[in-house]
Image (tube, rainbow, N blue to C red):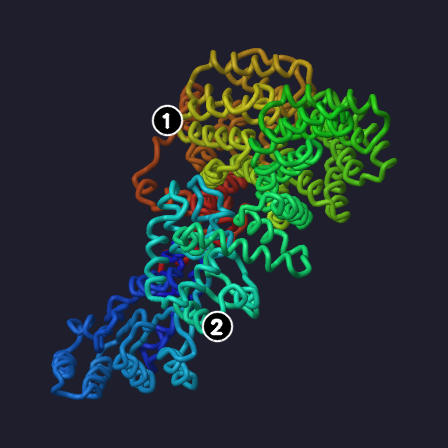
Amino acid sequence: MTPAAEGNWLVMDLLEREAVLQDLASHLQEAVTGPGRLALVRGEAGIGKTSVVNRLAQLADPRIRILVGACDPLATPRPLGPLTDLAPRLGQPVRTALTGALAGTCRSDEVFDCLLADLSSYPSLLVVEDVHWADEATMDLLRYLARRLPSVPALVVATYRDDEIGRTHDVTALLGTLAGYPWVHRHDLAPLSRRAVARLAGGHTVDAERLYHVSAGNPFIVTEILAAPGESIPATVREAAAGRLAGLSAAARRVVDVLAVLGRRVPLPLLAGMAPASEEALDEAVAGGIVRTDGQVAEFRHELTRLAVLESVPAAHRLRTHQQVLAAMRSRPVVADDLALLADHAEGAGDPTAVLEYAPAAAAHAAALGAHREAAAQYARALRYADLLPLERRTSLLEGHSQACLLSSWLDEGIASRRKAVQQRRILGDRLHEGEDLRWLSCWLWPFGRTVEAGRTGLDAVRILEGLGPSRELARAYLNLCQLACYEHEEVRVTAAYAEKAIALGERFGDAGVVVQARFHAAAAGMLSDGSGWQECEQAVSSAMAQDLPEDAGFLALIMCWFAALQRDAARTAAAVNRSEAYCLDHDLLSYLLCTRAWGSWGLLSRGSWAQAADAAQEVLSHPSSPPVVKALALTVLGLVRARQGKARVWPLLEQAASLVDQDCLLDTGLGWEARVEAAWLAGDHELVRAEAQRGLDALAERSHPWLTGPLACWIGRVGGDPPQVPGAGPYALELAGDWAGAADQWDRLGCPYQAALARLSGDAAALREALAAFEALDARPVVARTRAVMRTRGVRPVRRGPRAATRANPYGLTIREMDVLKLLNEGLSDAEIAARLYITPKTAGHHVGAVLAKLGVHSRQEAARKLHDSKR
């Protein structure tokens, strides 16, 4: 396997370094056949330069000699230190010349000549790390080799920190020498993106967005935080910062201390006013890699480094600096972008009056920009000093804090602040705002898992606001009851009645958000009841986005994920999740984003991508801000995946999910109760199946939702019971009517192979064989065993006995038949063509194709074919 090809398999754990690795592997492949090349790999400390060159060495052809040497951060660098490191792997002439040069008995250029001759005799990868610490002789060696590389079969890779070289650094001079050589290539390692940081944070209970913020995407800092989650500043980061500070002059250290106190992105004129004669000292700090300048602004390279430095600044010095900068900033006109800094310095200066002047304004500015977490933090800062304010202003701060927290998915804090606001509005006798606060409280109690209290609180809000006459607040209160009626699957007419009232008042008071949401939920109630209304819901989402109503649009987009998943429509769920994720990320709607991802894991479960579903659910669970409903959904997905795969610890996960939310909430979401019934069936406990299913049906007695009642009735029938006469949607209705073939076909169209196979268990011999193939493809071991037992009982032969040795040996767990299918995918065949070639039905071929894609972890037939192609290299 060539290095470039093997890179496709091995570089994925080095996130967002694939392109650089592929380029370096290509340089190496071309260099060893001549002419040679020089690659400069640069980036800040901790960016991953060593990891990249180490992986390059791992990927290299075994016939290529690997030579690695490094420069050290010594007060007096070792002469030719990197060459001394790698000398044991060089020929005797080089070693002899090097010994002589170090002893002063021969010149350095003799060593260079010998090294060049050695490199000319053997294909080599020569790595010189940390050139920013190199001695003068090593710099000369690089100049010498660079000029002559076209004549040798070698790739020379030199790494250096570009954040530690200034205008006068030796590396800067070296780069000038190399500028005209076409065989010299430069590769920058950029910080990790938000997505990459979130991927690294998967499985860790950390806020991925805050992790990205404090690390600025630096891989070293990210991994150190993840390795020490209980520490605000990991010891390794603190020590790294201290090590860099130790090399600074006293003047540079003073500038760095002032910058740490001043915060992020400090204007240079302000810094000059706080630290006179700071220009040369700042240049020194920049050359040391601690801070950087961008135009007329200076800032730390990483927020965590700033916090580590700030920790070491004496308290008296911090206080004095905050007081000075607060006075300086207040002496000039204040603009909106200054508000957050002013609030920070006001608190640091111990000035409560100034905090209450600037923090609420900073919070309102952040909220207007959609930066809800920043808004929540500023409101929390103001509330720490709110005892100085009249009750009316304290209550307004609580309301602002609650709203920002809720949109940031800090539900505990948001709901607590809203409860206090309700009490204080009652004390003030402000019935209008009391009703509005009750409405907001009701809105967020549902995702908090408290559906009963949500309904009761929503009715209280309406009663108060109706007594005050028509208002915009009453329109929103009616909308809230419309939403709750829809989510709790009450009769369509109930949702429609509240929607009509909300629309009338919304139009009267010009609240476009109320109108679009009410129309959406009226259509959604019909869609969930009889299948109509999908297009109307889609139009409402598009309308909210077009009218620039971010909170309304984000909310409706995530609700579409839920409803698509509830109807088990794999294609619609995937499209809805993709849209909602993108919108929530663009508008900083973390709470909605987490809900979207939970329902996305449900969609993956339905389409048979169980490993991906479990990964997505685990990512949601690991986020510290996931709401209770979101956690309950994710736990249920994990429990169901484990149950279908025949693994242990299923019921503890399902019980934990049930403990997080009200019983009605678990039922409303559509997965919780059905999962419990299926888990009981997979465990062979038919009595528990009937009991759990009947409990769910009893709870649904006053509601109208065929997507909830249908599956519970079907499970009763599957264990030999008499299914009750309840509404069933789509394939459930067909199964309850005895049309297993129609049900299976409909499940196939919805993209749900597991559900289709369950329906076929009631079918003839051909259906049983097709069901067995689907269950085996999904690795659904308990159902595979049940299906074989049913086949034996009915005299259907033959029945294969478990995974064959070839399947166990396959790295992806592919069966022999699935490998046959993969090979045909590589030929570009359709399902029908695969079926004809293998003498199976097109549906069975489709099941096998789906299983192959899921096991390979790819999303398309082309990707699967590429994996087969790469594995043969």
In this rendered view, identify the residue nearer to me: 170 or 584.
170
Q: Residues within 10 Å of mark 2 (few under 14, many from 20)?
A: some
Q: 650 or 292, which is in the foreground?
A: 292
> Which residue lies at the image location 44% right of the left edge and 44% below the top edge?
202
Callout 1, which amino acid?
Ala
The quarter of the picture where the N terminus appears is bottom left
How much space separates mark 2 and mark 1, taking CA atoms? 64 Å
Image mark for residue 279: 2
| Count of labels in the image | 2
Residue 743 can be seen in this image: yes
Quadrant location, the C terminus: bottom left
Q: Nearer the viewer, residue 804 or 56?
A: 56
Q: In the visual, does 658 lie left or right of 518? A: left
Query: x and y percent of residue 54 in the render?
Result: 31, 63
Residue 23 shows in this picture: no
Q: List the single residue furthest toward the right.
A: 508
Q: First in sequence, mark 2 or 1: give its number.
A: 2
Counting from the top left corner in percent of width and height, residue 543 is at: 77, 45
Mark 1, secondary structure of its residue? loop
Q: Nearer the viewer, mark 2 or mark 1?
A: 2
- What numbered label is drawn on residue 719? none
Q: Position of residue 841 (x, y in %)?
A: 52, 39
Task: Please provide percent x and percent y for residue 866.
Answer: 45, 57
Vertical side of 704 occupied by 479: above or below: below
Q: Does residue 860 appear left or right of residue 500 in this picture?
A: left
- The residue singled out by tag 1 in the image is 648
| Other residues around mark 1 within 10 Å, as few (<14) / some (14–19) / many (≥20) | few
**Callout 2, which amino acid?**
Glu
Labels 2 and 1 touching (C-beta < 8 A): no
